[in-house]
Amino acid sequence: MMDYKNILLQRSGRVGVITLHRPEALNALNLGMMHDVVAAVGHLDADTDIGAIVITGSERAFAAGADIKEMASRSYMDMYAADWFGGWDALTQVRTPLIAAVAGYALGGGCELAMMCDFILAADTAKFGQPEINLGVIPGIGGSQRLTRAVGKSKAMDMILTGRTIGAEEAERSGLVSRVLPAAELMSQTLETAAAISKLPAPAAALAKESVNVAFETHLAAGIRFERRVFHSLFATKDQKEGMGAFIEKRPPSFLHQ
Ligand code: CAA
């Protein structure tokens, strides 16, 4: 068994549960977290005794975004050369059904990670948003593509251009999440759903999700590649340095629009 520093990994029957666990940073997705999540999902996906995987966070936050402190001072070339966030794309190759159970904040990369799962179950406390514009960047883990496909152009533009956060009800109404559950029942109902799926024929489940994803993904890869390049390029702007610097220094940003 691997030693994970940023997640907890549990098994319950044929269900694997990955709990994002960086409570000091509201589960902000740093590189260590990316490696742990991708490795754990890969490990569970390869295990024929596992028929469904749940990714969840804490009551307060599924994940409050990519780790701003880890990115703030990087240059365009740093981001491009490391193909920053590229590792997350491995989740799209997973055959086992992947469910996101979201309570609290799912912002930026947190919302994007939830959207990389096959479907999202939300607690009534869940808050979704793509606030990257406040930091002088744009979504970089597929948000501009997956949110638009999930909720349509108008709602996606509204969320991505204003950075505003939506609650669980609005998220369900918009088609971003499949169900809203009372917070106290989020995990029990998610585990019940995952257990039910895990008992169904695994080859049919794998091919069913692959088929739905073909409907969803046609032309998505080109969109993601485009988005990644644009996201990296924003690290050449003064406003990215200002936006992320201001967050870390806990002060309002003063943008130069350059
Ligand atoms: N990166 C790094 N650290 C983060 C973080 C993030 N995304 N979100 C929260 N934290 C840290 C805070 O800095 C704070 O650390 P300290 O105690 O060391 O100061 C700790 O987590 C707790 O956060 P707050 O004190 O801010 O908690 P709050 O309850 O007052 O506010 C919040 C909660 C509104 C979610 C606020 O933390 C926030 O706005 N976070 C940033 C949200 C954001 O901008 N996300 C997008 C990130 S960029 C991105 O994701 C790019 C992409 O496309 C992938």
Image (tube, helix red, strand yellow):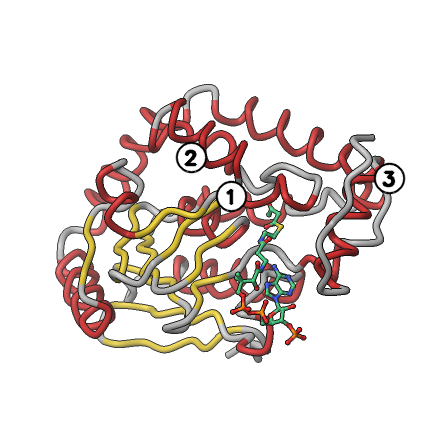
The mark that comes first in sequence, 2 or 3, is 3
Q: Is residue 192 above or below residue 220?
A: below
Q: Is residue 177 left or right of residue 57?
A: left
Residue 195: image location, x then y, percent: 17, 65
State yes or no: Cβ of the residue under disc 1 lies below 8 Å from any atom of ligand 1. yes
As shown in the figure, which amino acid type bears the numbered disc 1? Gln
Q: Name the mark on residue 59.
A: none
Q: Which residue is mark 3?
A: 77
| Ligand 1 - quadrant of the structure image | bottom right
Q: Which residue is mark 2?
A: 147
Camera-nearest residue between 75 and 10: 75
Residue at the (48%, 65%) spot, across then down: 40
Camera-nearest residue between 103 and 161: 161
Asked whether disc 2 touches disc 1, contact meaning CB atoms under 8 Å apart, the reply is yes
Q: Secondary structure at mark 2?
A: helix
As shown in the figure, which amino acid type bears the numbered disc 3? Met
Residue 251: image location, x then y, percent: 73, 60
Say which of marks 2 and 3 sits in front: 2
The mark that comes first in sequence, 2 or 1, is 1
Residue 236: image location, x then y, percent: 84, 36
Residue at the (16%, 66%) spot, across then down: 189
The mark that comes first in sequence, 1 or 3, is 3
- C-alpha separation, residue under disc 1 versus residue under disc 3: 24 Å
As shown in the figure, which amino acid type bears the numbered disc 2? Leu
State yes or no: Cβ of the residue under disc 2 lies below 8 Å from any atom of ligand 1. no
Residue 113: image location, x then y, percent: 47, 51
Q: Which residue is mark 1?
A: 130
- C-alpha separation, residue under disc 2 versus residue under disc 1: 9 Å
Q: Is residue 115 above or below residue 49?
A: above
Q: Is residue 186 left or right of residue 233?
A: left
